[in-house]
Image (cartoon, helix red, strand yellow):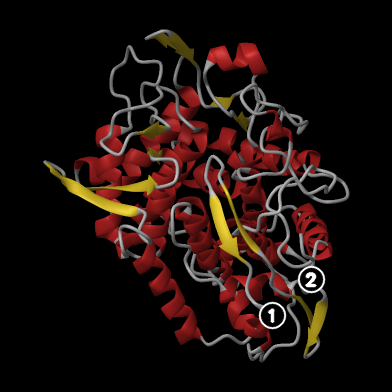
Amino acid sequence: MKRSLFVLVGCAALAVAGVTSCTKSKQGATTTAPAAAELLQVKRLSTKLDAPAGEGAVATGKYRNLFAELGYPQEELRAKLDHGFQALFHGDEENQAVYYVTGENEYGKLAHIRDIGSGDIRSEGMSYGMMIAVQMDRQEEFNAMWNWALSYMRHSDPRNPGYRYFAWHTTFEGKQLDLMPAPDGEEYFATALYFAAGRWGNGEGIYNYHAQADEILDAIKNRKQITGFGKTSAALFNSERHQVRFSPDLAHFASHGDHTDPSYHLPAFYELWAIWGPEADRAFWKECAKVSRDFFVKAAHPKTGLVPDYSTFDGEPVAASWDPNTVNFRFDAWRTAMNWSVDWIWFKVDPRQQELSDRLLEFFRSQGRGYANQYTLDGTPKSTDYSSGLEAMNAVAVMASTKDYREFVEALWMRTPPTGKWRYYDGLLYLMGMLHVSGEFRAYTPK
């Protein structure tokens, strides 16, 4: 794999672009790193990125915009965000879009987000799509996705071990392929609904966003164990460890132990739930935020800052029976830096998150151009592929860093929405990364 040289532009050393290739994973990724010539043409009005002091963005209402700090015009940024949404939600259905309108029911329009490469619908993508829609002020698309998720993914039969949860994946037609949930879907569904209540106010029935979010939070914490249809499941959070589970499936506990996925830890969301959620559980969510911050420090490698896809509640890597490579830094794990960085920018509770970002970004800077998208935790590449989804997550990590890692922000600026078979995961992470780095991903207090 090719590596980059670092070239000086003004006062900044920027890691320039690299190679492209394709990888097929649970999510998929196909990307080309931005070309050196493109980055050299960018005019910078700022010579240094400075970590702002003071309170977090949720308290002040001031969300950090790294693009503005580097001198990129706001009108160009707005055009990039609009273009990204248009491409992924309303672009060419064969090569660009992941959002598809499928019809109507008594609640209105129905639409879903497709994982094109894997050929299914995932609660991950549906909840990410809703979060993007509320951040972009697109209520029609938000409602259509929420309607589809309730109609085809949520279990309504009390005998079903997935009762009150969302099936983690379905066919394009809505046939459930697994009874069990993926808890990050529920986490993003709930938070997107709270933000919708803040941005647009509450409607009736399934569009009473605040009530729907409260229902999800009650289910993921308090739902009792249910046995049926050949499976037994528990709550989505381990109440003793105050951590989100990888799966509530007791058969999975028996084979792998009760464990977590580091990228499912979302302390910024838990802080908001501790303010907005059902009153009886607010202290629990506050403690979950604290525990997740401690967890990140345990899970991150002491030299590289890389975290595994799956881990114990103490941060030790877990190898899945179907894929032993889950002990490595891979596709799920990309998102973990976004989670601790957003928590820092929004709340500024734990300065260790700044050190985590510095450590991780220093490692990726050392890898040069076209850095791999998979590594062992000590930093040995496990692929020769470059992915725009990881590129976007590293740009978000800059928000919490104490040093000038502008090359990661500049690489995201030069990115365009991915196209082709594997556009789903990279595309959603790209657009969420753009929203975070531009300061346009915000917490809207629910009504």
The amino acid beneath tag 2 is: Ser
Locate residue 342: give its quadrant: bottom right
Work out whether 42 lies above or below 99: below
Circle 1 Cα neighbour tier, 10 Å, few/some/many (<14 / 14–19 / ≥20): some
* Disc sitting over residue 59 in the figure: none
- Which is more N-terminal, label 2 or label 1? 2
Is residue 277 at all visible to an observer of this figure? Answer: no
Q: In which quarter of the image is the N terminus?
A: bottom right
Front residue of 319/146: it is 319
Query: What amino acid type is highlighted by mark number 1?
Result: Ala
Q: Is mark 2 on a helix, strand or loop?
A: loop
State the residue position of label 1. 36
Disc 1 + disc 2, Cβ < 8 Å: yes
Place of residue 45 in the rendered image (x, y in percent of width and height, measured from the top left): 66, 92
- Does 60 sit left or right of 51 as displayed? left
Q: Is residue 187 visible?
A: yes
- Residue drawn at point x = 44 percent, y = 58 percent: 420
Q: Mark 2 points at which residue?
A: 4
Most extreme residue toward the left is 106
For image coordinates 26% across by 41% down, the residue present is 148
Q: Which of 119 and 290 is in front in this view?
A: 119
